[in-house]
Image (cartoon, rainbow, N blue to C red):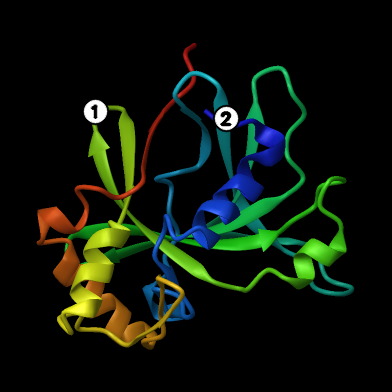
Amino acid sequence: MKTGRFALVLFLSLVLAGCFVASFYPLYTSADLHPDTLLAGEWFDGDSTLWKFDYITVQEKDKPSVTDSTGYILTFREKGEEQSKSSMEIRVVRLDGNCFLDFFINEIKDENYPDFFDLHTMAIHTFAMVTQKGDSLLLTWLGTEWIKEHARAHKLKVAFLERDDDILLTAPTSDLQKFMVKCATIPEAWEKGTFFLLHRPSR
């Protein structure tokens, strides 16, 4: 679906193009994070793009590295290509029986996108809801048109900013959590959202 080299940059482009609803604040606090195994390892999006989830490694000066199993570093690779050096930080957030992922662009390293590109990248989060379908995981983002319609009708029950037809959620984490839990009960909020169906590699 997307080449590994450009998958993260394309993901960012989708955010900038308004295909994902972005948030200034994360969906979690430290109290919401627990050791997790849901995503660990390799998954395929369709038949081509490999999503690799590795636990976060914390390295402090003059100390041994420590594995943080409450979060993942996500990298992409297309079959037959080198793994992307760019990455995203992923946190699994479980709220009221719902499972969400908090995506945060961790690092962009690509010879085609020098540091100048990094300087113009806003540190933002996007949130996906996870639904298990057998051995597969369905990742679905809120529909941007649903968000915009509710914002224009003054029915969006969460703080946000709107500029040039784009919505940026600005609510604090506690309000974001209430908002996402409420959205989880509204099927039409997700109907036209971006989605990916991930499955484990064939053995």
Q: Residue at x 24, y 28 (%)?
A: 134
Figure disc tally: 2
* Label 1 sits on residue: 134
Rendering quarter of residue 39: top left
The correct choice, above or below, for 129 with respect to 78 in the image is: below
Residues at marks 2 and 1, CA–CA distance in whole angstroms: 19 Å
Q: Which mark is in front, 2 or 1? A: 2
For numbered disc 2, what is the local secondary structure?
strand
Q: Residue at x 39, y 45 (%)?
A: 38
Q: Which percent across, then down, holds residue 193?
A: 30, 50
Q: Which percent across, then down, holds residue 173?
A: 37, 83
Sequence-first disc among 2 and 1: 2
The answer to whether residue 78 is visible is yes
Question: Which dot marks residue 40?
Answer: none
Q: Pointer 1: residues within 10 angstroms few (<14), some, or many (20+)?
A: few
Q: Which percent across, then down, holds residue 203?
A: 49, 11
Which residue type carries mark 1?
A: Gly
Question: Which dot marks residue 50?
Answer: 2
Q: Which percent across, then down, holds residue 191?
A: 19, 48
Which residue type carries mark 2?
A: Leu
Identify which residue, 65 or 194, lies in the foreground: 194
